[in-house]
Every structure is written in structure tokens, then in C-alpha cells.
């Protein structure tokens, strides 16, 4: 329970950053909960494995979206600096990239955690249901 609360709190802290509001079109996937492999049915385990795989795939899309956002912001800043008629010549703010990288790192950690949790549940299931 504490782990989930800490994860939610961390997500809220990152999502509350100014950079997060600027790239709201990137949807952060929510990690699925792994079932108790000792008591879950085969159907529940199959669904949980599918949920974990979907989360990992959605996380890859999310991370690529964030990286694309940083790239486009850098390109826009570079173009603005080149434009002689543009009076608002602001360089790319490295804070944006730092905050985005934190979001990517947090999501990557959630992917690793989700994989480890589902693998543990599958191992528990196999031990509880030998063939």
C-alpha cells in the first residue's frame, strides 16, 4: 500500500511541474496491479500478463512522445533564434529537458517494477498450480 501511495505521490509531483502542463498531449499510462499468483485463476493471470505487456508498450509510446516534445521544443527555439523578425528570441530552456527526463526515468522504473511484479506473480502461480 505504501509503495502505491509513494508512486501516486511521485506522479502527482512530476505531473504538477510546469513542463508537464506544456506537453499535456503525452498520456502517461497507469501501471497495472499484479494479482496474487497463489490464489489467482489461470484467466486472471493471463489477463494480468496482457495488462503488463500493454502497460510496457504504452510506456514506450509515452516515452517517445516526451522525447518528441523535447525535440520539437529545441527545434522551435533554434528557429526562433534564427528568425530576424522575431522579437521573442528565447533559447531552449534546459529545465524542460531535465523535467521530461525525470518523467521518463520514473516511467522506466514503473515498467521495470511492473515486469518484476508480474514475473513474481507468474512464478507464484506456477508453484501453486503444478502440472
Image (spheres, grey):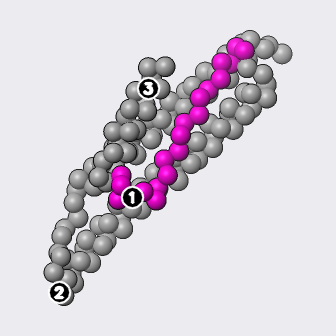
- Residue 81 x, y percent position in the rendering: 19, 77
First of labels 3, 2 by sequence position = 3
> Can the viewer see residue 105 in this picture?
yes
Q: Residue 14 in the image: state x and y as whole percent.
A: 35, 42
Q: Which residue is mark 2?
A: 84
**Can you tell which mark lies on residue 5?**
3
Residue 126 position (above or below residue 14): above
Mark 1, Cα crowd under 10 Å, few <14 / some 14-19 / many 20+, is some
Q: For the residues carrying marks 2 and 1, which lies nearer the camera in this image?
A: 1
In which image quadrant can residue 89 be found? Answer: bottom left
Give the alpha-carbon distance from disc 3 to disc 2, as whole Å: 50 Å
The answer to whether the residue labelled 3 contacts the one labelled 2, judged by CB atoms less than 8 Å apart, is: no
Counting the numbered discs, the total is: 3
23 vs 29, left or right, is: left
| Circle 1 SS class | loop
Q: Quadrant of the C terminus?
A: top right
Between 110 and 32, the one lying in front of the other is 32
Residue at 57% in and 42% down: 56
Between the C-alphas of marks 2 and 1, the distance is 27 Å
The crowd level at tag 2 (other Cα within 10 Å; few <14, some 14-19, many 20+) is few
Q: Is residue 106 above or below residue 76?
A: above
Image point (74%, 32%), residue name: 46
Q: Which residues are magenta?
A: 20-39
Taking the spot 31% from the left edge, 54% from the top edge, the residue there is 19
**Which is nearer the N-term, disc 3 or disc 1?**
3
- Mark 3 or 2, closer to the camera: 3
Decide whether the magenta segment is chiefly helix, strand or loop. Answer: loop
The reply to whether the magenta stretch includes residue 30 is yes
The tag on residue 77 is none
Element carrying mark 2: loop
Mark 3: few, some, or many residues within 10 Å (few <14, many ≥20)?
A: few
Amino acid at each position: 500500500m505504501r509503495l502505491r501511495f509513494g508512486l501516486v505521490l511521485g506522479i502527482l509531483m512530476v505531473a504538477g511541474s510546469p513542463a508537464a502542463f506544456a506537453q499535456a498531449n503525452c498520456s502517461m499510462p497507469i501501471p497495472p496491479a499484479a494479482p496474487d499468483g497463489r490464489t489467482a485463476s489461470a484467466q486472471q493471470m493471463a489477463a494480468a500478463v496482457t495488462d503488463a505487456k500493454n502497460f510496457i508498450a504504452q510506456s514506450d509510446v509515452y516515452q517517445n512522445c516526451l522525447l518528441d516534445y523535447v525535440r520539437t521544443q529545441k527545434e522551435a527555439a533554434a528557429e526562433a533564434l534564427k528568425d530576424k523578425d522575431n522579437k521573442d528570441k528565447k533559447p531552449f530552456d534546459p529545465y524542460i529537458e531535465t523535467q521530461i527526463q525525470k518523467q521518463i526515468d520514473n516511467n522506466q522504473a514503473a515498467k521495470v517494477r511492473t515486469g518484476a511484479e508480474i514475473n513474481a506473480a507468474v512464478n507464484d502461480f506456477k508453484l501453486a498450480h503444478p502440472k
